[in-house]
Image (tube, rainbow, N blue to C red):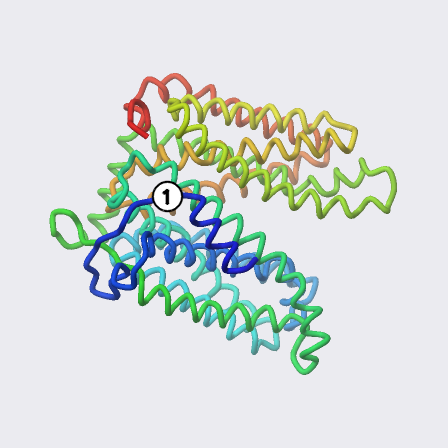
């Protein structure tokens, strides 16, 4: 993907307005051009997701190349996952209390150190340290920049444009992950042919380190963080945790979103774990294995299309976001159940893509509702709790499915996952709709 294509994508996502801020770092307006800050923030978001995708297709192979074995590979990756889960919520609190820019820069620094260590690793112990450090960095970055980007957008464009920033974040994340994964798959071949003196997967690591360095420079120069509107300093950690707990506990809308998000992790665990082995059984002959690549593309493409379609629908029809959210979640569950019933490849592919189309459509109202209900001063904490809840849902699903798969077929497991989503929709529906005022109802678009 060229810089020109990225630029056109960013412009297409949001028309925006002229930005006029006085910042202690660099005044973006001084460089000329409308929406420069918006585009730079978007570039940072894209690059951050690109770097995540860069190692996705080869991470396990790179770890084995650096000294891991098949018997301890799961331990190394498990330590990474555990460090992310344990630090997810504390990192959000840290971002809110000590500053989101500082936390994001610390995240990038920790990730850079982890890959420098990985590049020079020669055995199991150093790999464990590298992956724990990587998990620490990922946890720090999970909510810090998103919260900062959303706060800036609300300040400049208003809460009535929340659907546009959530769409932008969703699309940039998908573009970055897919582009990173695509290019990351080619780098080992390039390394083998042109750079035989380094390891097969070292080029992925080196590119990761170099672009992260660029990202650190961009973030240090151009990211700005506004002070509290009342001019007060950040609350102490203990007081912040209490304020966050009280705000979340008293807001049924946020609690309902978290219940729904838990079911998201639950269903994604079922679908992502078992779709490949099930899909292979539907293929008419071995030569059809290339369809696996098509399915991977459809996953990202359908989710991205769903996000854009959701944004267009909200802008054009001014629907109640709460009702739209419940409808798209219900359709997601029904498509998951429908996918479980398919025995023909074309129908399975269509149903599978429809799941992620609905998933993308549901994500926008979900994020708009959550962010509109969340005070700015605890936004990173809430976003970290959301990410943590998804991971816990996925972990719970994985544990349950590992038991059920002994007695049930994969389609039956998918039906259970779809039913869980429907149950959560039914559980939250009445109070969710009749609760606090919908953030996008009766608001001028």
Question: Who's the residue at 36% across and 54% down the image?
Answer: 145
Q: Residue furthest bottom?
A: 197
Q: Quadrant of residue 294?
A: top right
Image coords of residue 240 (percent x, y)? 23, 48
Q: Quadrant of residue 65?
A: bottom right
Image coords of residue 180 (percent x, y)? 57, 58
Task: Tell which of 394 and 5 is nearer to you.
Answer: 5
Q: Quadrant of the C terminus?
A: top left
| Disc 1 crowd, CA 10 A, few/some/many (<14, 14-19, 20+) | few
Question: Who's the residue at 48% across and 41% down the image?
Answer: 390
Question: Who's the residue at 59% across and 27% down the image?
Answer: 418
Q: Against 324, is 231 above or below?
A: below
Q: Residue furthest right?
A: 285
Q: Against 444, is 95 above or below?
A: below
Q: Is residue 309 left or right of residue 286?
A: left
Q: Is residue 390 left or right of residue 78?
A: left
Provide the residue designation for mark 1. 15
Q: Is residue 235 left or right of residue 1?
A: left
Q: Quadrant of residue 444?
A: top left
Q: Quadrant of the N terminus?
A: bottom right
Image coords of residue 273 (percent x, y)? 65, 43
Q: Is residue 97 left or right of residue 3?
A: left
Image coords of residue 428 (percent x, y)? 41, 22
Q: Secondary structure at mark 1?
A: loop
Q: How many marks?
A: 1
């Amino acid at each position: 993907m060229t810089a020109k294509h990225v630029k056109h994508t960013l412009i297409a996502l949001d028309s925006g307005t002229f930005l006029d801020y006085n910042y202690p770092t660099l005044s973006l307006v001084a460089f000329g051009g409308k929406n420069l800050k918006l585009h730079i923030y978007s570039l940072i978001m894209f690059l951050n997701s690109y770097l995540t995708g860069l190692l996705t297709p080869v991470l396990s192979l790179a770890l084995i190349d650096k000294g891991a074995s098949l018997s301890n590979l799961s331990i190394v990756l498990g330590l990474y996952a555990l460090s992310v889960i344990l630090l997810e919520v504390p990192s959000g609190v840290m971002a809110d209390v000590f500053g989101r820019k500082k936390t994001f820069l610390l995240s990038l620094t920790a990730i850079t150190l982890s890959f420098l260590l990985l590049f020079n690793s020669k055995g199991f112990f150093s790999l464990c340290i590298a992956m724990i450090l990587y998990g620490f960095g990922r946890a720090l970055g999970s909510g810090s920049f998103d919260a900062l980007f959303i706060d800036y957008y609300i300040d400049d464009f208003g809460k009535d444009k929340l659907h546009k920033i959530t769409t932008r974040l969703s699309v940039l994340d998908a573009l970055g992950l897919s582009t990173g994964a695509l290019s990351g798959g080619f780098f080992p071949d390039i390394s083998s042919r042109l750079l035989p003196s380094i390891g097969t997967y070292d080029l992925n690591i080196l590119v990761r380190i170099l672009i992260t360095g660029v990202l650190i420079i961009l973030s240090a120069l151009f990211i700005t963080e506004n002070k509290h509107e009342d001019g007060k300093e950040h609350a102490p950690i203990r007081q912040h945790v209490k304020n966050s707990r009280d705000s979340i506990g008293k807001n049924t809308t946020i609690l309902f979103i978290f219940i729904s998000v838990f079911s998201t992790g639950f269903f994604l665990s079922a679908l992502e774990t078992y779709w490949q082995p099930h899909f292979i059984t539907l293929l008419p002959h071995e030569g059809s294995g290339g369809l696996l690549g098509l399915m991977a593309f459809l996953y990202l493409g359908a989710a991205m299309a769903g996000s854009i379609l959701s944004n267009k629908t909200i802008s054009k029809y001014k629907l109640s976001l709460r009702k739209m959210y419940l409808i798209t979640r219900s359709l997601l569950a029904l498509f998951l159940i429908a996918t479980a019933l398919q025995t023909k490849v074309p129908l399975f592919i269509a149903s599978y893509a429809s799941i992620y189309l609905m998933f993308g459509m549901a994500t926008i109202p979900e994020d708009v509702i959550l962010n509109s209900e969340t005070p700015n001063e605890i936004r990173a904490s809430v976003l970290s709790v959301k990410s943590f809840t998804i991971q816990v849902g996925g972990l719970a699903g994985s544990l349950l499915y590992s038991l059920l798969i002994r007695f049930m077929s994969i389609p039956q497991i998918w039906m259970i996952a779809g039913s869980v989503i429907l149950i959560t929709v039914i559980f939250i529906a009445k109070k969710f709709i009749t609760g606090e005022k919908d953030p996008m109802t009766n608001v001028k678009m």
